[in-house]
Amino acid sequence: MATMFNRGILGTKIGMTRIFQDDGEAVAVTLVEAGPCTVVQRKTAADDGYDAIQLGFGSKREKLVTQPMKGHFKKAGDDNFRFLREVRLLEAGDDTPAVGDKVTCDIFEEGELIDVVGTIKGRGYTGVIKRHNFSTLKESHGAHFFVRHAGSIGSRKPQHTLPGTKMSGQHGNKRVTLQNSRILRIDADKNLLYIKGGIPGPNGGLIMLREAKKKKAKKA
């Protein structure tokens, strides 16, 4: 029997709404259209050094697909996939998905903890207040127009700025992982997952959902 190190699937973020639980509490959730994804490639420890499945999701025009990728996609069908991602397996078995099989959102269960991987929105060039959550200086007693400055970036020794010093710069537009998000509801007919709270990325952006690596400890 196969034990997946990370059961994973690709999806599209739809947006946020709220649902009511059985006790009447209103909870903010994010809707994700998860799959169906197609297994494009099966990697094994003997050939590739590790066990994994490569998932294809979405589609794009045929003219945008190179000939080598067309041959790669043809093994799983005639679809021209827009996104390809790998899901690592702890060990392979008889129930491991084969090339051409479909992976749907029913690999997860309601109440399960998952990790959500996405690309957050780009904020452009920002200062240290917004980028690193610095505090502002007092707006009195001689601060003048240096209220949102970072302050000192070094001292006399060493006579250079240390690497890794937090400064202003590009903010956002990077891959982030939100750990231990909970699935509150699953609509398998519409391939919808209701995930508690917000998740990274804009509406319509690519999202990868996988089994949580660092599950929260159960409360006593």
Image: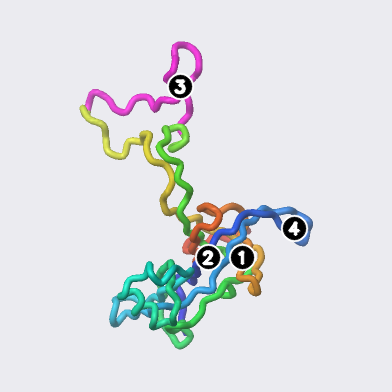
Q: Which residue is mark 4?
A: 20
Q: Label 1 sits on what residue type?
A: Leu
- Measure the C-alpha gap from mark 4 to mark 2: 24 Å
Nearest the camera: 12 or 94?
A: 12
Q: Label 2 sits on what residue type?
A: Gly
Instruction: Give the residues drawn in magenta, as a range.
Output: 134-157
- Residue positioned 44% across, 72% down in the render: 56
- Residue positioned 52% across, 76% down in the render: 103
Tell me if label 2 and label 1 are in contact, CB under 8 Å: yes
Nearest the camera: 145 or 140?
A: 145
Q: Residues within 10 Å of mark 3 (few under 14, many from 20)?
A: some
Tell me if label 4 and label 3 are in contact, CB under 8 Å: no
User: For this view, does 35 lie left or right of residue 76?
Assistant: right
Question: Whole-percent x and y of residue 106?
Answer: 59, 75
Q: Which residue is mark 3?
A: 147
The tag earlier along the polypeptide, 4 or 2, is 2
Find numbered disc 3 in the image and state the secondary structure of the residue it sits on: loop
Question: Whole-percent x and y of residue 190?
Answer: 64, 71
Find numbered disc 1 in the image and state the secondary structure of the residue it sits on: strand
- Residue positioned 45% across, 77% down in the render: 79
- Measure the C-alpha gap from mark 3 to mark 1: 44 Å
Q: Residues within 10 Å of mark 2 (few under 14, many from 20)?
A: many
